[in-house]
Amino acid sequence: MAPSASKYLVETNKLTKHYGSLVAVSNLNLKVKTGSIFGILGPNGAGKTTTILMLLGLTEPTAGSARIAGYDPLREPLKVKALTGYLPDNVGFYQDMTGLENLYYTADLNGLSREVAKERIHAALERVGLTEAAERKVGEYSRGMRQRLGIADLLVKDPPLIIMDEPTLGIDPEGVRELLQLIRELAHKDKRTILLSSHLLHQVQEICDEVGIFVKGKMIASGTIDQLGSQLQAKEKLQLELKAEPRDEALYQLCRRTEGVTEVKGEGDLLKLTCQKDVRPQLSKALVEAGYNLLHLHLRGFSLDDIYSRYFQKEGGFYGQDRTA
Amino acid sequence: MARTVLPKIEALENVVQANRGLTAVIKKEISDHLSGRRFLILVILVVVACLASLYIAASAIRSAGQNADFVFLKLFTVAGSTLPFSFTAFVSFLGPLLGLMMGFDAINGERDRGTLSHVLSQPIYRDALINGKFIAGVIVLALVVFGLGLLTGGLGLLVFGVPPTVEELLRILVYLVLSVVYISFWLALSLLFSILFRQTTTSALAGIALWLFFTLFAVFFVGMIANAIFPLSESSPAQQVLANARLEMWLGRISPNALYDEATVTLLNPSVRALGFVMLDQLYGAIDAPLSFGQSLLLIWPHLVSLIAATLICFAAAYFAFMRQEIRA
């Protein structure tokens, strides 16, 4: 009943959603720390939007439960919705109303008084750079402008938790940069918790404190980007790229002898080593001691990007299936 | 003591907050309707139709002389030869279109534009949206219907210079209320369709199909069913004829149009003393005089209640469907 003082603002316990025989989300245990930016990453149809809708109480879970600041979205929807700002992908505004009118409607729905609303709306429009366009109809807005109006909408509501669904979708690179900057400000300057979903890892990885990777309704890994790297790494064999001079048979021998290396292959002017752990320290030392000049040593697949795309390719590809529309 | 009071205050706050959301939705929907072009076009259509019927009625009444009873009511009911429609016929025919037009994209339109999830993620209860839409629709309908009725009455006053009696005024007011209820039925129906069908065109067509069925084909079907159950021939006994007619009447009353039309005739034409058929022996000794307002009202009371019930059933179905529906686009 009472809001918990837990350090997690969002918590789910075995959250599950079935659509007929389709399992959209399965046994999800999600924890989002208060004040952090959490990224739900995953390909289309991985259950990201479904998860978000369940957190907001807009969709009923088949099993399990969710808590926002200790409130159950199903039992106390108003509390949860008052605490949470939601920016859907392709955020909807009334086309034949101006940006300003749309924001006033949001303020009305939130029960803000006229003065507070006016103050917040003008500050919000200023902040997202839409003051000039405020009197224009939303139908004339570009996608980027609509997205910024969506952020302004959140600022008017001023909630401690913000949930964004694919915020960067369909926005040009410059727009994405500005948007991410805004999101970062929302989190760090305004001290809000942000939960965002995306299938574009490269765009959001830099601003997320923690991420969870979703594939087919399951969260297969979560943690900080670094943790995630090693977490996923542990399940995979490592690939090392090595270039050293002189390149002779003894080099191959030396590589094979190193502990943890299982396979050595020559590919172009590089040697490719498959190993069970990161052998770079031992290997470089051994090479130098044996009198080789080490020209290049790179651990492939260590960047999250590589792992992420590898996971997605394995699971049917980025655009393998449409969003659960 | 304080412990028991606190939750109550909290509950009260919830109610207040929920109503704030409802008010916001109602305000927005009303301004949407009134500023929308679609609404403007339809209202212009209805106004023109009604003014035309007023003009026709005025000339028909004038040529027939002014000594008839209830001249003022005739403004609404008399049809001329050039335009075979009276004011009431127009409202009965075009009113449903107005209701359908106002509601057919209420929910699926919001879903299409992606505003549904946005609105519902604000701190309002889910039913505030659908309640707000319905209430706003009824308010706008009431504005239009009363505006139109009073306008026609006012113009009639200018044309004839004969003021209405209190009874006539009461009859017109009840007629207008009845019309609002009747059009609200169509609004609730289109609201239901907008929830059941994902495409706005589908819901619009479904509404129009039902409207056509009730206004044009229902009478035909009802007659067919009655004849199938109680076949008539020239030598049919009186009981058979009576049973046929009775079944036809009761089946016909399933249609809200039939209910509305019967109620309208009774209200605006005080000389209508009974609905349905009357036996000769019942007529024996009856005095040929108009009914008083109270008696007319008594006669159509079941109609009014049925229409209200039909409206509420439609709205309840819409409410139920909406509360259980997935929100995602």
Image (tube, coloured by chain):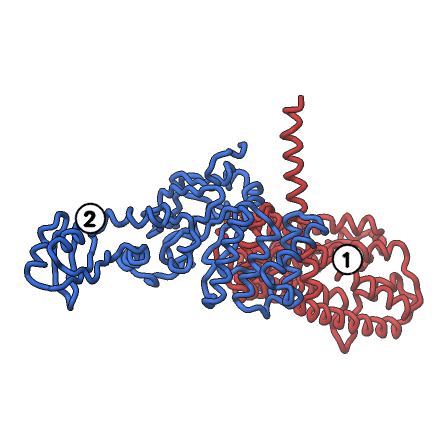
Q: What shade does chain B have?
A: red
Q: Which residue is mark 2?
A: A277
Task: Give the image quarter of residue B92.
Answer: bottom right
The dot on residue B93 is none
The CA distance from mark 2 to mark 1 is 84 Å
The dot on residue B176 is 1
Q: Residue at x 53, y 47 (%)?
A: A192
Q: What shade does chain A have?
A: blue
- x and y, in percent, of residue B229 in the image: 54, 56
- x and y, in percent, of residue B313 in the image: 60, 49
Disc 2 element? loop
For the residues beneath circles 2 and 1, the answer to whether they share a chain is: no
Residue count near mark 2 (Cα–Cα under 10 Å), binned few <14, some 14–19, many ≥20: some
Nearest to the observer: residue A14 or residue B243: A14
- x and y, in percent, of residue B53 in the image: 78, 71
Disc 1 element? helix
Q: Is residue B151 left or right of residue A135?
A: right
Residue B7 seen in render: yes
Q: Residue at x 40, y 40 (%)?
A: A63
Evaluate if marks 2 and 1 touch, with contact meaning CB atoms under 8 Å apart: no
